[in-house]
Amino acid sequence: MVLEGLGKSLRNVLGRITGANSINEELIEDVVKDLQRALLQADVNVQMVLGLTKRIKERALDEKPPAGKGPKEHVVSIIYEELVNLLDNGEGLRMESQTIMMVGLYGQGKTTSCGKLALLFSKKGFRVGMIAADIHRPAAYDQLKQLGEKVGVDVYGEPGAKDAPGVVKRGLEHFRDKKVIIIDTSGRHALESDLIQELKDVAAIAKPNERLLVLDSQVGQQAGPQADAFHKAVGVTGVILTKMDGTAKGGGALSAVAKTDARIVFLGVGEHIRDFESFNANKFISRLLGMGDLSALANIAKEEFAGDKEVEGASRHIMSGRFTLKDMYTQMEAVTKMGPLQKVMNMIPGMSKMEDKIDYEDSQARLKRYRVIMDSMTDEEMEDPRIIKGTRIGRIAYGAGVEPHDVRELIKQYEQSKKTMKEFMGNRKMRKQMMKQMGNSGDLGA
């Protein structure tokens, strides 16, 4: 998870509030100190931390809870709102036809981000083209071409060319039928005058709708000065922060960039081509605080499984109250496709509280083992698990290369999942709330 350490610390702070007998000045003082410690450990600027916690303290002590909201809930809301305000600096990147110019220094993840962005737009139905305008780094064109092949997007480049604006001009003509064009530009180890002029010349030819600066979040608070420098040079409209997975300096980069005029639009959260998230301050803080992000989970599901008949069929079975091992198998495949288990779980409200009790590596391995066991079953057994007894268990275990107790463990897990599904479908209020949050207001057979 992005900034996992900070998220855990913040959730401990909220737990201290919700577990208190009452809200008083002593508790608020302690909570403020805990918040300061958590944010400073995440490399957030000292002055920003002091300003943030001062506002939280003043509001928590002076504001009266609104009607229908208790003191604890009100203090939690104040912390949430102030953290969002710290990072909220404008809307994300619009999903529409446009030309995007990517800029940044060497080693920041610019070319990889081009591929991730191209995949995002292509999955939204846009015809995308990428232009390799980095004429200085020998492997730049080959890297972009490989990424293009991986995501199914065409790449234009002229290996050996010495004129970046010319390459861009011819690339735009080549891609005149594309709705979204992404231009990968040259970088340097520092923002030098010749790089600035080249970027200005490319921008004059391309007339991009967006100029996105790619920054390595591991530079921490130095991300702010870099963003300012590029903004003065080429007029940056948005920032992509890369390597946000597992970096202690991520908080510094986030807060430093948020303090500039440029808006944060995406986070690179891993090396995989799909490890790319739209940045929204509300959703980001919601996940950090363990409140989940069901809308993001729903969007991933829609993108991954649109038109997938097996997933749609399994969903209908669940909604109708019928749940077989086939449906469970489909669910497991779906979860695996959506990304690492920890990332998916952290999008579900409240699941972050279980993080210390969940061995994600073991759970991932168990999911894989369960699927192998189910591959060893007949269609009849998958449709009616009640018949899986005695010699059937031995046969299934032998076919899957596991022990009989592994098969029994799977059946036990299935029964627990079936019970949970039944309880969920029987709770009309809970079901409607979940469907609403996932962008589906339909009653689904209620």
Image (cartoon, rainbow, N blue to C red):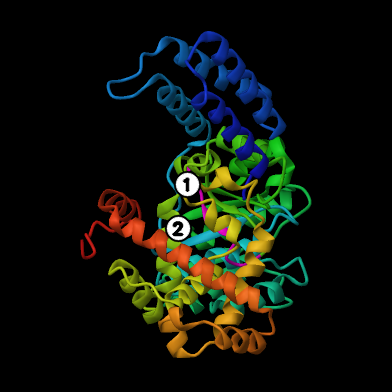
- Name the residue at the front extreme: 390
Residue shown at 45%/22% (left/top)?
Answer: 75
**Mark 2: secondary structure:** helix
267 shown above or below 13: below
In the rendered structure, does residue 240 fall within the stretch colored magenta? no
In the image, is residue 302 above or below residue 326? above
Q: Which residue is mark 2?
A: 297
Q: Position of residue 431 (x, y in %)?
A: 30, 54
Q: Main secondary structure of the magenta part?
A: loop
Residue at 42 percent across and 73 percent down: it is 305
The image quarter containing residue 156 is bottom right
Crowdedness of circle 1 by 10 Å Cα count: few (<14), some, many (20+)? many
Image disc number at residue 105 = none
The residue to which callout 1 is attached is 292
Residue at figure coordinates x 30%, y 68% from the top left: 321
Q: At numbered mark 1, what does the secondary structure look like: helix, strand or loop?
A: loop
Say if 314 sits above or below 354 in the image: below
**Is residue 376 among what the camera can see?**
no
Question: Mark 1 is on which residue type?
Answer: Gly
Task: Determine if the magenta segment contains residue 278.
Answer: yes
Badge 2 or badge 1: first in the primary sequence: 1
For this view, does 444 lie left or right of residue 136? Answer: left
> Does residue 388 appear to the left or right of 368 in the view shown?
left
Q: Determine crowd level at label 2: few under 14, some 14-19, many 20+ residues with C-alpha closer than 10 A.
A: some
Disc 2 to disc 1, how far (Cα)? Answer: 9 Å
Residue 44 visible in the displayed image: yes
Residue ID at (45%, 15%): 59
Amino acid found under the numbered disc labelled 2:
Leu
Disc 2 and disc 1 in contact, CB within 8 angstroms: yes
Q: Provide the residue span drawn in magenta.
A: 272-280
